[in-house]
Amino acid sequence: MAPEINLPGPMSLIDNTKGQLVVNPEALKILSAITQPVVVVAIVGLYRTGKSYLMNKLAGKKNGFSLGSTVKSHTKGIWMWCVPHPKKPEHTLVLLDTEGLGDIEKGDNENDSWIFALAILLSSTFVYNSMGTINQQAMDQLYYVTELTHRIRSKSSPDENENEVEDSADFVSFFPDFVWTLRDFSLDLEADGQPLTPDEYLTYSLKLKKGTSQKDETFNLPRLCIRKFFPKKKCFVFDRPVHRRKLAQLEKLQDEELDPEFVQQVADFCSYIFSNSKTKTLSGGIQVNGPRLESLVLTYVNAISSGDLPCMENAVLALAQIENSAAVQKAIAHYDQQMGQKVQLPAESLQELLDLHRDSEREAIEVFIRSSFKDVDHLFQKELAAQLDKKRDDFCKQNQEASSDRCSALLQVIFSPLEEEVKAGIYSKPGGYRLFIQKLQDLEKKYYEEPRKGIQAEEILQTYLKSKESVTDAILQTDQILTEKEKEIEVERVKAESAQASAKMLQEMQRKNEQMMEQKERSYQEHLKQLTEKMENDRVQLLKEQERTLALKLQEQERLLQEGFQKESRIMKNEIQDLQTKMRRRKACTIS
């Protein structure tokens, strides 16, 4: 079970200092420790609209995020609060409270636009908080949404002929759910005399105006952006909690002192967020945890600081570089652990060692495949393969050395008494050669009976015997009981046995080479098999995401047709056709 991270209060995640956005390293440390998947809820809105109050409620606290009751924005930059998710076990709820937009002291909308964009990129649920009704003034204040095509890119290298609007067609595939919270809402929810739910009111407010004038386009643009970019939309209305003069003490007041309708509305809002806000997920179904969110924050803020546009694809690739490198190390660590537990050197045969390597290698590849994603050109898997090959070769070398050491030690123990007898002249007498050969054969048999000598057993023995040929020949030549003919026959016998042993060792060497080649082929096939399965799973996952995006676009196109907006419908139709073409290609794709 992953440990819970429960910050006692909010802390700055991204500071806004003199017009510069700077990441707080202490906040990154907190994120890096969160191993659980994260649900990220960000709130954005004009200053002094009660954003922080809602976030404190989501955190289950009365105090936390600073509540501003003056005409100045209290929150600067983006603040973060990490708490255990109240309804999703093993998940962390990350709340992001943003600097109030339109602060009179700043007089600069540039940073407001970037904070708005960052809140969208980092969150899985994006809450826009405003006062009163959804009228044209409210839409004008939401002009930041119309700048998203100038602030965010979905792809790092769009087609040469692709403009910002065409690139933004992919926004719906990774944008968060959109929740509009309307504070101090005092009107009856109705249209044309018919009562409306808050969601119906939002849909009604996002209707486009027919016409081609500049005024009509200005009216339609923010509405069209919200409709096209955000896959899921929700609306909540809130009555005024207390009399205006008591708003400054809002965080100190008990629920009994607040308007009952407001209390219930806040409870409904929190319940919806807890139940419906999704885990932050990247393209390919990659669930975001603390370290991944940390990487996204750094990548986006660094892009803005360097004058580039934050790019979803670049952020995912940067994250993949970090995680795939870690996946290689994790896989190698697993291999080392498995081999350390299973291997006892020297192994009795090369095949025994290679079988253990194959099992551990397969598991290591599985570990890598589970932990990696977006491995462009399979560079990290190739790195893993190279490291596993080296590990295998190292084990083979260690096995050979362990076998040599074991066999040399055995020879020393078994044959040293014979050597002492030779030095003492025991065999330098008539009939001594036969006694010597018999003793030698007995000791060879004893040597062969010793267990776990490993792959060097024969070679070490033959090398030893060859080094003693001069001693053997001297005993032979000085044995006066043997005739010259018998001595010649014995010399030829010894030569024949030596040649036979050499041929046997050559065959064994060839067999070992064949086993190594077979193992290399098996390794290649294992990598290919698991890679093919992963690529197929990724293909299926991407198709599911594209089908979801297609369904959303088809729904929006149908609404546009029903409302009579032919031009906008044709633009959406082109986006749909482009997406359908990509999906057909992916469905027809075969992995080679």
Image: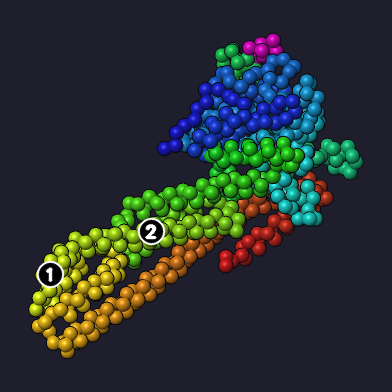
Q: Nearer the viewer, residue 335 or 101?
A: 335
Looking at this rendering, what residue extends furthest in the top direction?
A: 245
Residue in view at x 65 percent, y 18 percent = 67
Compared with residue 63, is residue 161 higher up or lower down, i.e. above or below?
A: below
Circle 2: residue type: Phe
> Residue 578, image x and y in percent?
72, 57
Dot 1 falls on a residue whose secondary structure is loop
Q: Is residue 553 visible?
A: no
Image coordinates of residue 487 in percent, x first then y, are: 17, 85
Disc 1 residue type (three-letter): Gly
Which residue position is annotated with label 2?
395
Q: What colouring does the structure picture have? A: rainbow
Q: Quadrant of residue 357?
A: bottom left
Q: Magenta span has 333?
A: no
Residue 162 shows in the view: yes
Q: Which residue is mark 1?
A: 425
Q: Is residue 346 left or right of residue 120?
A: left
Q: Which residues are magenta?
A: 242-249
Q: Nearer the viewer, residue 574 or 554?
A: 574
| Residue plotted at (19% across, 87% down) | 489
Instruction: Decide if residue 54 is on the left or right side of residue 511.
Output: right
Task: Name which residue lies at 66% across and 24% down.
Answer: 51
Q: Residue at x 29, y 59 (%)?
A: 405
Give the mark nearest the N terminus, 1 or 2: 2
Q: Residues within 10 Å of mark 1 (few under 14, many from 20)?
A: few
User: Disc 1 to disc 2, how far (Cα)?
Assistant: 44 Å
- For the residue labelled by badge 2, is the local secondary structure a helix, a strand or a loop? helix
Q: Main secondary structure of the magenta part?
A: helix
